[in-house]
């Protein structure tokens, strides 16, 4: 039974590493494509003399690029043995929602008040979630610091 358990563990570790390599390559590819799209949006804005609309589209792409950077940093930390920070995923979701809100004025269809309310509510809830996650992490780190000081004083 131990041999089966060892082989299963090896298979799972190999699969996990391979999956993280695939995720890393996908993040690099997406970043390259978004960078190209960012410059293409700027080019189109200049060509069509629609600077405000082009600027808002480019800003939306820039927010997605920022998201890619955050995900790449999280993947790097994980590959180096660090824990995955849940707050990063809340931050990414918040950036995507904020991007959608920014893009509403240049959307093909005009948003209704219900649409605006839903996006605003989603941004508010994600913002509160982000605040509570980061506050909890801060309190945890402060309690660990206090515990370490107490342990040092006892020794």
Image (cartoon, rainbow, N blue to C red):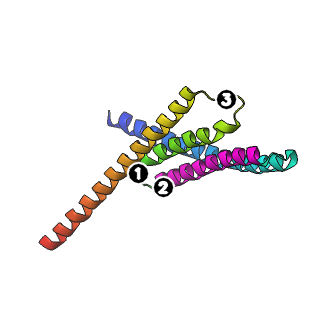
Q: Nearer the viewer, residue 100 or 32?
A: 100
| Residue that protrudes farthest toward the left in the picture | 154
Q: Nearer the viewer, residue 84 or 145?
A: 145
Q: Which quadrant is home to the C terminus?
A: bottom left
Q: Which quadrant is home to the N terminus?
A: top left
Secondary structure category for the residue under label 1: loop
Give the Cα separation between the discs numbered 1 and 3.
42 Å
| Residue that protrudes farthest toward the front in the picture | 113
Q: Which mark is residue 110?
A: 3
Which residue corresponds to the image point at 33% horizontal and 56% vertical from the top-left?
138
Give the Cα separation between the discs numbered 1 and 2.
7 Å
The residue that label 1 is drawn on is 83
In primary-sequence order, the first of circles 1 and 2 is: 2
75 is within the stretch colored magenta: yes
Which residue corresponds to the image point at 40% horizontal and 43% vertical from the top-left?
128
Using a 10 Å C-alpha cutoff, classify the residue at mark 2 as few (fewer than 14 neighbours), some (14 to 19) or many (20 or more). Answer: some
In the image, residue 45 sits, relative to residue 117, either above or below, namely below
| Residue that protrudes farthest toward the right in the picture | 47
Res. 119 in view: yes
Which residue corresponds to the image point at 51% horizontal and 37% vertical from the top-left?
120
- In the picture, measured across the screen, residue 138 lies left or right of residue 77, that is left
- In the picture, measured across the screen, residue 42 lies left or right of residue 70, that is right
Give the Cα separation between the discs numbered 2 and 3.
41 Å
Mark nearer the viewer, 2 or 3: 3
Q: Which residues are magenta?
A: 52-78
Secondary structure category for the residue under label 3: loop
In primary-sequence order, the first of circles 1 and 3 is: 1
Image location (x, y in percent) of residue 103: 65, 39
The residue that label 2 is drawn on is 77
Q: Are marks 1 and 2 in contact (CB under 8 Å)?
A: yes
Q: Main secondary structure of the magenta part?
A: helix
């Amino acid at each position: 039974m131990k041999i089966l358990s060892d082989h299963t563990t090896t298979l799972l570790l190999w699969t996990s590493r391979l999956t993280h390599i695939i995720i890393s390559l996908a993040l690099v590819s997406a970043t390259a494509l978004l960078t190209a799209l960012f410059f293409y949006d700027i080019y189109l804005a200049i060509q069509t003399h629609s600077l405000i609309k082009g600027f808002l589209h480019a800003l939306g792409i820039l927010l997605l690029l920022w998201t890619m950077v955050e995900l790449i940093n999280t993947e790097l930390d994980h590959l180096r043995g660090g824990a995955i920070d849940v707050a990063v995923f809340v931050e990414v979701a918040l950036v995507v929602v904020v991007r959608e809100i920014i893009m509403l004025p240049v959307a093909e269809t005009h948003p209704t008040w219900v649409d605006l309310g839903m996006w605003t509510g989603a941004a508010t809830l994600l913002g509160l979630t982000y605040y509570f996650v980061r506050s909890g992490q801060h309190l945890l780190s402060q309690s660990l610091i206090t515990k370490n000081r107490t342990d040092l004083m006892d020794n």
